[in-house]
Amino acid sequence: MSTRELSSRRGRARKGYGGKHMSQAVEPAAEPSRDPFAALAQEDPLVAALSEIVKSLKPGDKLPTERELTKQLDVGRTALRDRLGVLEGLGILERRPGSGTYVQEFNPGSVSMALNLGISSAQIPLAALESVRIALERQAAIEAAISADPVLVAYMQRALDQMAVAQDEQSRDEADRQFHQALLRSASNPALTFFADAIAGVLTQDVKTRSSQVRAADTAVSSAEFFVNAHREIHAAILARDPDRAMAAVNHHFVRLETVPL
């Protein structure tokens, strides 16, 4: 998208608010959001109250007892248990029979489950999610080239070596996963790693399927050679501490996958 087009879009977005004062009522959207998670806390005050309690604790900490929570929040035990179940389903809490309810360390796998349900409900195409994944990896490559952590760069090299000698797709896919994990961690940006892992959890099977299709269709160069070379380009750019080259290498790597529709 050109700078002019982007500017035009931003201008239209600003006009959409009609320049109204913040205190004035805004007309409701024509269609309500289909995302079941986006406004969960806003729509459910009890979930919001429990979320505030959870945020005041650390992973592994125990929540107050149900009796204490019902008194503190002035709610019935049935309603409380229902909302605790919601937060447990999202991977935020863990209820241990006979012991109590504990705060879990929120991990990308938990986000993947919620994300999978959310994008399905909102009818977001996987192709749109894939473009987000590529953007995250592109940014990770830029930041990795700046920091170039020698240990993680060495992990990338080891994954490359495993990729080069892999005799089957399963071994090659595992080496590919290890390479991209090392790439994301080389960026030294935990937010990039967290969200990329969450998205990868949703896209894993689709990416594997498309990778296989690309390999099967590739007649100009062997599938193994192309994928190893594409990853070598990324590794070499990071080793050279060249952010622009690293970004271009990531683009080159993913452009083959983008030719196969989700």
Image (tube, rainbow, N blue to C red):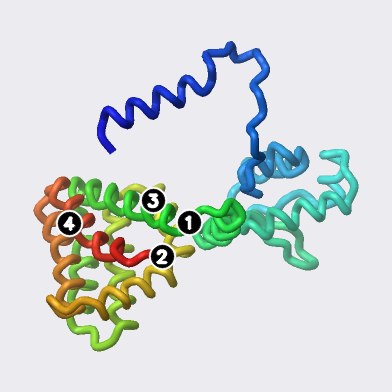
Rendered location of residue 66, percent (x, y): 83, 52
Q: Which residue is mark 3?
A: 132
Q: Secondary structure at mark 3?
A: helix
Residue placed furthest toward the front: 30
Please name whichever residue, 166 or 159, is drawn nearer the observer in this view of the structure: 166
Please name whichever residue, 68 or 43, is drawn nearer the observer in this view of the structure: 43
In the image, what residue type sits under mark 4? Ala
Left or right relative to 10: residue 168: left
Q: Which residue is mark 2?
A: 262
Q: CA distance from mark 4 to mark 1?
A: 26 Å
Label ID, residue 125 = 1
What residue is drawn where x is 58% and y is 11%?
21
Please name whichever residue, 158 or 222, is drawn nearer the observer in this view of the structure: 222
Q: Is residue 24 above or below residue 125?
A: above
Q: Earlier in the sequence, mark 2 or mark 3?
A: 3
Q: Earlier in the sequence, mark 2 or mark 4?
A: 4
**Marks 2 and 3 in Cβ contact (< 8 Å):** no
Rendered location of residue 240, percent (x, y): 9, 53
- In which quadrant of the rendered image does the N terminus lie? top left
Rendered location of residue 69, percent (x, y): 81, 45
In the image, what residue type sits under mark 3? Val
In the image, what residue type sits under mark 2? Leu
**Marks 1 and 2 in Cβ contact (< 8 Å):** yes
Left or right relative to 24: residue 179: left
- Disc nearest the viewer among 4 and 1: 1
